[in-house]
Image (tube, rainbow, N blue to C red):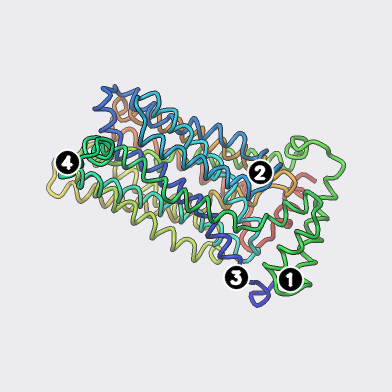
Amino acid sequence: METNKSINMGYVTAVSVIAALGGLLFGYDTAVISGTVSQVSHQFGLNTMQSGWYVGCALIGSIIGVIFSGKLSDTIGRKHTMIISAVLFIASAVGCALSGSLNELVIWRMVGGAGIGIVSVVCPLYISEVSPAAHRGRLVATYQLAVTIGFLAAYLMNFYLLNQSHGYSSANPTMQRIFGTEVWRGMLGFGALPAILYFLVSFFLSESPRWLLVKSRDKAAQQVFSKIYRNQKDVSFQINETKQMLQAQAGQKTSWKIMFQPGFRKAVFIGCAIAMLGQFMGVNAVLYYGPSIFETSGLSSGDSLFYQSLIGTVNMVTTILAMLIIDKVGRKKLVYVGVSGMIASLVLIGVYFLFGSQLEWSNIFLLACFLAYIFFTAGSISAVIFVFLSEMYPTKVRGLAMSVATLSLWIGTYLIGQLTPWMLETLTPSGTFFLFAGMCIPYMLIVWKLMPETAGKSLEEIERFWQKKNA
């Protein structure tokens, strides 16, 4: 029913960009760790498993944040949940920069991890609920773009601060530690600046109109929909569509009961499967341990951080490309093409570590393979995962259902963060990347056989699809 002329794209884009700032913090806080692992490990004398714990501790916080985020956002609203996440990011960045021991550092990293877990649920969820169907994929992908910008910002900041630290001198002992002798503190602490910005602009957001309808605040919902649609008929249509779906679930008093109806239960299981499998296809291993992997191939720490910055650039640019085509091409086609390219790239990286490390131009070949892998990953599974998860579930329990699926994502991310050093050491780099390539196959089969194409469909139409599958 909606048309481009009836949609106030300026407003929708503005609120989507504000919500997507949570993704920028997600990306920065996740990727900044890659430039600090070797410094922190050296300073505190960490062994391989302890280094894995330093990386993985924030993911424990993320899992905790995910567990509470769905219920929290369904109870107090999407907007106020985002504000809480901003406070956690600010506290974490400041705490990490000033921490006096490894235990304090781990605790503050877990606080930041809780913020990551919350925004990974509530930000794409909010964008999905305010987006018109024809533009929802692109707008939700704005969140993923912000994540990649956060990745790139972290890589560039790590590279810049590391170079600046060599000649840095300050009479203030705290500043000397943060930006000189223990520059990893500056890398982690810089995240406070975008977190403060996110905290301030979140107050300008309207609440999700679909959440307002769940809470029977029809007048407030109508006011928000009126900002999204210029045509009053479209406003009435969206309100009636959502209320019809809510009335169909009116007899079920518990959120868990609705979520585990046979049709919706299948959607939850599929979401959990693709969320977890996606982490075992290697992307976070590259993002977390990229500099360490490059150093294994003989690069200096400075060169490895520069290579990682190139990876971050490709990640961001490819995400922009995916944003432009996701609503036209569809989610599933992006997965088919992208995952096929990921398999080829991962196999070539594995072959390099078997045979190619002593060849001329071997470092250039390795970089090219990594860049190709990131290109195909950013254009497929990274672009569609939060789109899929934000639109698969019924309105009444969307926050809770998405938190369950996102919990699977973070469990997989934690396991990868914890196990990658062990896999690189035990399975060797070649065996590790061959394993990642093998994990791509079940992911593609699930999307092919079990997932519907959701491009261009309203959230209510997708909800009816799962109901029909049950019937």
Residue type at mark 2? Ser
Residue 92 or 401: which is nearer the viewer?
Answer: 92
Residue denoted by label 2: 73
Foreground label between 2 and 4? 2
Please tell me how crowded label 1 is: few (under 14), some (14-19), or many (20+) other residues with Cα within 10 Å: few
- How far from the left and from the top, in percent, is residue 126? 62, 53
Residue denoted by label 3: 9
Foreground label between 1 and 2? 2
Label 2 or label 3, whichever comes before in sequence order: 3
Label 4 or label 1, whichever comes before in sequence order: 1
- How far from the left and from the top, in percent, is residue 26? 46, 45
Q: CA distance from mark 2 to mark 4?
A: 45 Å
Residue denoted by label 4: 300
Label 3 or label 4, whichever comes before in sequence order: 3
Compared across the picture, whether 163 is left or right of 119 comes to left
Image quarter where the N terminus lies is bottom right
Do labels 3 and 4 touch, CB within 8 Å? no
